[in-house]
Every structure is written in structure tokens, then in C-alpha cells.
Amino acid sequence: MPELRKDPILGRWVIISIERGKRPTDFVSPSQRKKGGGFCPFCPGNEHTTPPEIMAFRPPWTQPNSQGWTLRVMPNKFPALQIYGDLNKAGEGIFDKMSGIGAHEVIVETPEHQLSLSTISLKAVEDVLWAYYIRLTDLKKDPRFKYVLIFKNEGDAAGASLEHTHTQLIALPIVPRTVKDELEGARNHYELKERCIFCDIITQELEDTKRVIYENDKYVAVAPFAPRAPFETWILPKRHESGFYPPNKDFSGLADILQRVLKQIDRILDVPPYNFMIHTSPFYDEINEYYHWHIELMPKLTKIAGFEWGSGFYINPIPPEEAAKFMREAKI
Amino acid sequence: MPELRKDPILGRWVIISIERGKRPTDFVSPSQRKKGGGFCPFCPGNEHTTPPEIMAFRPPWTQPNSQGWTLRVMPNKFPALQIYGDLNKAGEGIFDKMSGIGAHEVIVETPEHQLSLSTISLKAVEDVLWAYYIRLTDLKKDPRFKYVLIFKNEGDAAGASLEHTHTQLIALPIVPRTVKDELEGARNHYELKERCIFCDIITQELEDTKRVIYENDKYVAVAPFAPRAPFETWILPKRHESGFYPPNKDFSGLADILQRVLKQIDRILDVPPYNFMIHTSPFYDEINEYYHWHIELMPKLTKIAGFEWGSGFYINPIPPEEAAKFMREAKI
């Protein structure tokens, strides 16, 4: 019997169409992530083909926009939003619009074309998290921006137009709809219970254990109760933290769990394309009691079709309890 | 300069990243809709390979589940939801779930494997709309269902697992999230203005004309102000109608505009994969003053990636005014 499950934060339902006995290999995406050849603007030696770098981790004796870096951040060469200008909010009859002001940056995570977040060193993953944090903190100073969405598209099917591993961020003059909905759901729960709904979920999941994928001292990775996609995974700090910042100036625990989960997914789903997104509190309400920052990770295994477009619901062919079990048992 | 535009019903923002001078061919999907060979369960002669038909348009001298039909409706062989059983709403700690009760049906629109909604006769399109209406009216009688979502996936990239043209419907015990959000947006507007927001939009679009794609006596096709995807098209009745039903027992006007728009899209985008969905009022509130039923049609040309997943916003590389112009000028 299939099951309808409700995400407690968003109120979004998913259909878990329990086809039991399926193995992870039944979900393997037809398009693996591949690292081929050809010209790559993110490879060392081609620094001049990208917009000038905003920051980089590089030895002090190297020059900006030259080789020697281990991580590099640049504006996106084809930005979705434009950094210069005013918001110019305007109406058009019944409609509302504003200038497409925002920042669109690219974080190149390693100079090595063949590597990915699951195969670079743990120290390099920590550096990537630091780069996220530094850019977030810098963009916060711009009064035009309310939010920075950090997201990663890995593999062509997941929307990456370049195969050299990289993360993107978009700074926005408005809070994204999904985050707004999460904030609202979390606020409603807080008003009712005076507790963070994510903290409540974490407590229940850690007691229950069946949807827990991995945990270390500070973080837990779970298959959410109502996942949109097979093997969807959330990484959350165990302690209440409303915003993405390094607790005690230390990202080692987060680097450990992020890389661990990516290795598990690569192992059981044969290096699938994937997306992940960081959801954190908006700049204007960064420290609060009701919202809990987290990473949402989704391997790209299914298609969005008419039912999903028309309903906002998702059909997921594998229960999260089974997905979590496969993930836990992955030999990495 | 890119533009941020807000959908007035949902409050959803999209980024129109205006890359001017692009031609429709720049958006052509790498995967055309193809009609190949091989065994097809929807072709005449193979009626025994599908679940028994629920209804069919067929001459009175033919037997159910045999050849001779012009349109055929069956339960989906691999349903996302199950038709038999009770809802059994239950909690699991903080979480909510219920049995996956629902109907999942397939409407095979023509016996001809090579044809599609844009190439069958206009009379056959009318028949398809009648089939939608008859199934909707029948499923309404089941007190377990609150909503029926009618949707079409055409082409593999749009999620169709069989290439023989067909529509699907899913009857649900809950109102889909997207429809709920639309109802809420429409209700808010009605409370403020005592007018239907869709009627207001139609009035403005018909005066403005720049986003109008096609109109006939009773219906209008527009490129919405804040479209999620290139060449997204909405078809709406010009007069206020809250639910999907045949005005004066006549679907000819709707058949005309639907097929016309599909022909335009096939022409300028080279037979792209697409999805369309019918949004109508829920069963329990079918006749009302604030909601306006409509068809949302989206050619499948772009990928959903981390930004869209994480934000609920969309990046659209072509302004709807330009898309509408290309559509209007399509030689069909």
C-alpha cells in the first residue's frame, strides 16, 4: 500500500509508492557524473578566461588570477542577476517587478579537474565550507541583499554546465519562496510549542534511528520523513543553530559528515548527478530560536513531470527508511 | 538588465535573465518527442495487456477491451496511489501520514501511435476534453477524493514512460499544494477587491496584447507575466468560470485553442517534450467567485537544478513578451 506523508515544516505531501525489494541500483541515474577532457575555464592555467577572482586560497607568493590556488571564487561569467544598480521596484498594472540585482558567484573547490567533493581531502572540504562562510559574511554587508542561497549542481543532469566541481551562490534582494515557507512553518511551530521544529525532528529521529544515515559529535544526516526524491538527505547541526556559521571556529565536523554522505551516495548510486542547497536564516533575522539551518541533498534520479508541476507534490518510489538503511550499510 | 518578476497569484518570483536576440531554436530541447516502433500496450490489438477499460469511445457493435475504439481510459498499470481501502490517517510522533488512497488513470487519446494532440482531428481533441470531464464528474462521487489533477507528460524528457500519446489523472484525498496556494492567493485578492484575480489578469492582458498568444470567442492563451519556463503558456476562459466544465455543453472553443497552441509550440520549438496540467476548483468548492480554472502548459526546455530546488524561484532566459511574439508569428 502506498503512503501519503506530510513534511511537518512545509506541509508538503509526498507519495511514497513503496515498491519493495528494489535495490539502489534500480534507481541509478542513466547519466553518471563524468569528468572528460576538453578546455576547462576552471583548470589552473586558464585563470584569465574567467572574470577576475573575488577571493582565493593561495600561497602568499602567488599572484591573483594566476596558478597556485587551492580554491578560487569568481563572479559567474553568465550571471542570472547583475551586481550593479538599484532595485527600482515598479508595478505594471496588476503585476510587480524589480531590477534583477544580485550577486552570482562560483566557488571552484579544487584545481584538480578529476576530483569532486567526495574525493578531495577532508581539509579541502573544510576550506570549501570556509569559503561559503566568508562569501556569506561579505555579501551580508550589502544592504540590497536579504539572502544568499548556496547551491551545488554536480553532473550535467543536475544542471551543471561545467564538469569541473564547483558550488554557486546567488545573493538575492528577496528571501526565496522555499525558505520563506520553511521560516513560516517553523515560526508557527514555535508559537505553538516554544520549540524549534527542526530540534524536535532531530530528537525524534535520533531516538528512532531508522532514518538516521550517519552522525558525528555535532551533526546528524537523516533521510527526511517525506522526501521529494529517492535518497534525499538532510544534514543538520544537532544543537540549535539558526544560521550557517562555524561553531567554535571549526568546520571539521561538518566537513566530515558532508563528505561521508557524498561518499555513501557515490558508492550506492554509482556516482550520480546531485544537487545540494544550504538553507539558513535570512540576514535580517540571523539569530533566532525557531529556525535551524541545514543542508538538503538530492541525487538526481527521477524526472519532474506534469504531476509534480501541477500539484507541488512528489512521487518517491523508495521509503526513506529503506534509503537510510542502504546508505548506512554502504561500504566506503 | 535581468528582471525579477512576481506571479501575482502565488507570490512566486522568477528571474527573467533577458538574453536578447535569442531565437526559439536556441531553446530547442536536445530530446525531441519521437514515436518509434516496438511493442505498445496502448495500440489497438493490445487491449488485453492493459488493466480493463473504465470507459471508451467506441462504436456500439464493438466489445469493451477489444479494437474499434477512438479513445480509451484505463487504470494506470503501475499506479502511484491505490484505489481500494480507507484513508487511515495516523501520526508517527511529530509526523503525519495516511494510506495512499487515490485513483490513477490513463486516457489514451487516439488509437494512432504516430499522432499527438497537435495532429489528431479537432473533433478528436474535443473528445479528449469530454473524456476529462466525464472522468472528473465520475470521480467526484467518491467521498474520499477532494481533487482530481489532470496532467499530460508528452515525450521522454517530460516524464512520459510510454510514447503513445496519453493524458493521466490522479484523484487525491487532499488538495494539491500548488492549487491550495493558488486558491489562497485568489481568495486574498477577492477579499481585497471583490474580483477574481484571474479575471483582472485577463482584462489587463487583452488590453495590453503583448503577452497574448492566441484568442478565440471564449478562450485566451497568454504567456504569463512571471513564467517558470521558456514558452510557458496559460489557457483561460475569458468569462469567469471556477471549474472545468463544458460551457453550453460545448468544448469546441477549448479544443481549438489547445490544439492551436500545441501546433505553435511544435512549430517553433521543433516538436518539444512538454507537460500540461489543468487547475480547477476543488470538489468541495466547485462554484465560486474567486478562482478561475485554467491550463498551464510548459515545454520541457530547461533543467531544474540547485537554485530552483533551494529557492522555489525559477530562472527563465526568455521574456514572455518575446516568447508570445514568436508563438503568434508561428506559421502553422
Image (tube, coloured by chain):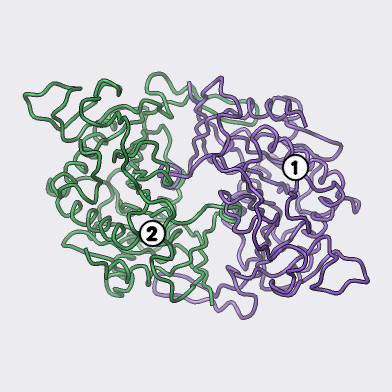
Chain colours: A purple, B green
* In-front residue for pair A195/A144: A144
Question: Crowding at label 1, few (<14), some or many (≥20) Cα neighbours within 10 Å?
Answer: many
Quarter holding residue A216: top right
Q: Which residue is mark 2?
A: B232
Residues under labels 2 and 1: Cα distance?
36 Å
* Side (left or right) of B3 relative to A124: left
Residue A199's x, y, as percent? 74, 39
Whether the residues at callouts 2 and 1 have beta carbons within 8 Å, the answer is no
* In-front residue for pair A217/B285: A217
Q: Residue at image x 58%, y 49%? A: A158
Q: Which residue is mark 1?
A: A236
Q: Chain of mark 1?
A: A
Residue A260's x, y, as percent? 78, 38
Residue type at mark 2 is Glu
B123 w.r.t. B260: above or below: above
Residue B8's x, y, as percent? 43, 63
Q: Residue at image x 16%, y 48%? A: B251
Q: Residue at image x 32%, y 74%? A: B210
